[in-house]
Image (spheres, rainbow, N blue to C red):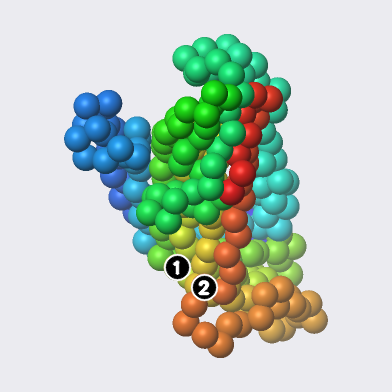
Amino acid sequence: MHHEGHLQTLELLVDINIDVCLASFNKEQKNKDSDQGLDTDIMAQMLDVKINLTKPQYFALMSLVTLVPKLFDFSNLNQQSLLHTSSPGPIQATAASATADLIPGIAPVAKMADGEDVSLWTAMGLAFTVTNATLDLFDTMIEATETTQNNSISKFSLNSIHVNWKFQSYWSMASEISFKAFRTIDTCTWKTTKFQEIIPVADHDGDQLVLSYNQLAVNSNCSNNP
C-alpha cells in the first residue's frame, strides 16, 4: 500500500503460537490400551491469531479455500493397490456402538460376505483448537487523508474454534468444525460501505455453528452405513 508516494507495510500474521502434541502407537500398544485405539493421534492448540489482509489477498485466499475439498477426493485412487492388505470379499459396515470414540457417521465394525465381523479402526485423529482468530481487512486504495491504521475496512472475529478430523481404515473419513461466536465489525465508519452480518449473534452459550462432513469408503467392495 502507498500513501503520498511512500510505501506502507502491512504485517500479515501477528504473534502466532502453536502447541502440537503427536502420539503414534504400534499394534502392541493399541492392544494393551484399547482395541479401538488410534494409530496416530494429533492434538494442536493455537492461541489468539491476528491476520491482516488487503482485499486482493482476501479474494486469493477465498479462491484457495474453495479448492480444499478436492484434497479429500479419493475417488480416482486405485483402491486395489492401496488396500492390498485388506481381506477379500465385500464388506458392509454395521451400526456404530454407543461407546465408539468416533465422530457420528462412521461405523467401527464391518461384516465380511461370510458374516464374519471385522473391526475397523481410526488410523489418524486430529483435534485442533483456536481460542480466537481475527481477520482485519484493509483497502488498497488510500486517500490523501488516510493512513495504514485507519485504512481498515472491516474486522471478522471467530471465537472458540474446534476442528475434529478422523481418518478410518478402508478410506472412510469424518470431520467436524464448530465455533462459539462469529463477529463482523465495521471499521470504515467514514465510508458508506457496510458489511452485513451473515450469521446472527447467538443468544445462548452453545456453539453458534457446527459443520460436519462424512466420506464413506470409496472402494466398490466396501460400504459404510451409519
Crowding at mark 2 (Cα within 10 Å: few <14, some 14-19, many 20+): some
In this rendering, is residue 23 above or below 141? above
Labelled pair 1, 2 in contact (Cβ < 8 Å): yes
Residue 58, position as x, y percentages in the image: 67, 54
Q: Could one spot residue 134 in this view of the protein?
A: no
Find disc 2 in the rendering and name its residue: 207
Residue at 71% across, 46% down: 66
Left or right for 83, reference 6: left
Can you tell which quarter of the image residue 146 is in? bottom right
- Pointer 1: what residue? 160
Above-or-below relation of 196 to 61: below
Q: Can residue 154 be seen in this view?
A: yes
| Amino acid type at mark 2 | Asp
Which amino acid, by three-letter code, is at mark 1?
Ser
Q: Residue 195 carries which label?
A: none
Give the answer, above or below, for where 174 lies relative to 28.
below
* Rendering coords of residue 132 (x, y %): 45, 67
Q: Nearer the viewer, residue 216 or 65?
A: 216
Label 1: state its secondary structure. Answer: strand
Give the tally of numbered discs: 2
- Residue 56, position as x, y percentages in the image: 72, 52
Q: Residues within 10 Å of mark 1 (few under 14, many from 20)?
A: some
Residue placed at 47% from the left, 38% from the top? 109
Q: Image check: 114 left or right of 3?
A: left
The structure residue drawn at horizontal position 70% and vertical position 78%, both measured from the top left corner, is 197
Q: Which of 176 and 118 is in front in this view?
A: 118
Q: In which quarter of the image is the N terminus?
A: bottom right
On the image, the x and y values in percent for residue 52 come to 56, 59
Classify residue 44 as left or right of residue 114: left
Q: Could you tell me which residue is drawn at 63 percent across and 64 percent down?
A: 137
Q: What element carries label 2?
A: loop
